Structures are given as C-alpha cells and as structure tokens.
Amino acid sequence: MDERLAAAGMTRTGAVTQPHLRPWATALKAPTCGGTVWLKAAGPGTAVEAPLYRLLQQVVPDHVLEPIAVDVARGWMLLPDGGPTLGERVAGRELVEALTTALPRYGQLQRDLAPHTDRLLSMGVEDMRPAVMPARFDEALAIVRGYVQRRGNAKDRGTYERAATMRATVAGWADRLAGAPGAPSLDHNDLHPWNMLAGPGGDLALTRFYDWGDSVVAHPFASMLGGLGFVRSHVLEAAADAPEIHRLRDAYLEVFDDLAPRAELVETLELACRLARSPGR
C-alpha cells in the first residue's frame, strides 16, 4: 500500500485497519493525505476482479472507481473511497427513484463491454453465455448429486430428482435466449444498491459500480435477476409485477430499445432471468 501510494504522490497518514474479512476477499482501510483508500485482496475464487478492473478502467472509466494501483498477479487493488453506497444514502421509494437513473447507466456499461467478451473470457471471467448453460446445468446437478448421495435426506433427494427432470427445459430456454436480442456481456452477478456508488457530489447520473468479483459473461439481461429481485424482495417487498418493478425494468431496457420492440425485450429479460435462476447459476 505504502509503495503504491508513494508512486501516486500520496502518503498514508494513519494506521491501517481491516474492516472486512471474508472467505473470498479482505479489505484494508487507511487514511492518506488524499483521503481514505482501500486495499482489496481477493481470494483465488474472485482474483479475476483485478485484471477485470483494468479492462473496466480502459473501456468504461466513468462507471467505476479509478484504481490507484492494480496488481494482477496477487489479485490486489488499491482504490479510493467512493463514499456511501446508494443503499446507505437513500431508502424505500427514494431508493427506487435513484435506481431509475443507476440501472440505465449499468445497461450502457454492458453495451460498451459487449465487444470485449473474448477478452473477458480470456482473463478468466466465468462463461455463463446461453449456449453454455446446459453444460453448466449438468455440472451443477453432478455437484448436487454428490452431496445428496453423501449427506442428503429424502427431501433433498426429491428436490434433486425434480431438478434433474428440468434438463430439457433448461436447454430449450438456453436455445431461445441464444437467438434473442442482446449480445453477451458482463453480468455483475451481485447487482444491488450496496454495490453502487453515486458520482462526485452525490450525482446519480454518474453512478459507479464496484465489487466485481462474482462477475460472469452472460446475456446482459440476466443481471436483472438480482438487480430487480433485490429491490422487489428487500426494498419494496412487492410482487414481481408491481408498477415500481416494471418502471425499473423499463428504465433499464431503454438502453436496448434499438435492438427490438419493447415487448420482445421484456420477454427476453424474463427468459434471461428464468435461465439465470436455474441450477446452472
């Protein structure tokens, strides 16, 4: 941390603390002459975030925090503090209003990154494109089958057997989605208001997104399984067809309106979320 700060013309002015320690990553926090900084060290399962951050910095620099330094070999990133998250800034209906601005901005990020899918895959971002999902489904079933055989009870076995019968259905969904509007792109895969930061001065029109360690390459609309689902269940406690949820969905889809009529985009979004909800994800 001190070496990279010095290279950036900054100095640490206080002790380093460790506010976050999880199995998948840890984050160290320190005060500096230029404000608070964070050193995030990813575990092996999320280390792809480091090279991914470099690509994000190149392609969509205004949509992410600008890193002070990135060490790809170690999976370390030194980042400036981004201030309170949207989830910390606002709540309830006010948060829904904020998301009507944030979600279209996220959709534009996805469109800007779509031409870089090969780079995303080559750096190790998990492949969850529609054509791959039947194989992912089979992999998930194999893992679950092993657990059920070792430790499962009658209920577990029944759940596994019901899931196994869905194989042809999942393959059909994947085939339909592969031919639907929307090129594969980056799916944050943990998109919620606590992973969104307002821009400088609290400007929601410059919302930035962070914590990319769970990202996958998928149909872009699959992001809304979490993006809309979190708001529905944790913010509004509303039904899936609530007007507020439709408003957020439509705000996000506006970025893709040149690809197909809105009704087709809505159908595609529902299909992408249905496939993302399958055991393959």
Image: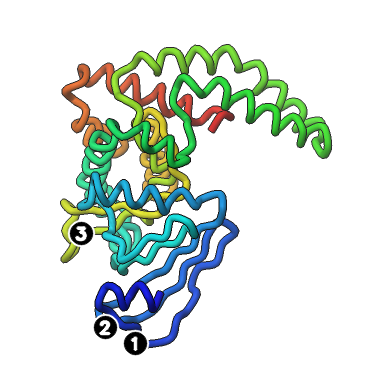
Label whose residue precedes the other's in the sequence (3 or 1): 1
State the CA–CA distance, disc 3 to disc 2.
Answer: 21 Å
In the displayed structure, does residue 155 sit left or right of residue 196?
A: right
User: In the picture, residue 116 is in which quadrant?
Assistant: top left
Residue positioned 47% across, 79% down in the render: 17
Q: Which amino acid does label 3 sit on?
A: Gly
Residue positioned 35% across, 28% down in the render: 184
Q: What residue type is labelled 2?
A: Cys
Q: Residues within 10 Å of mark 2 (few under 14, many from 20)?
A: few
Residue positioned 38% across, 36% down in the render: 223
The x and y percentages for residue 245 are: 31, 37
The x and y percentages for residue 268 are: 34, 21
State the CA–CA distance, disc 2 to disc 1.
Answer: 6 Å
Residue bearing mark 3: 199
Q: Residues within 10 Å of mark 1 (few under 14, many from 20)?
A: few
Q: Do the residues labelled 2 and 1 touch (CB within 8 Å)?
A: yes
Q: Nearer the viewer, residue 254 or 280?
A: 280
In terms of secondary structure, where does tag 3 sit? Answer: loop
Residue bearing mark 2: 33
In terms of secondary structure, where does tag 2 sit? Answer: loop
Q: In this view, does 26 lie above or below 194?
A: below
Label 3 vs label 1, nearer the camera: 1
The x and y percentages for residue 275 are: 48, 25
In terms of secondary structure, where does tag 1 sit? Answer: loop
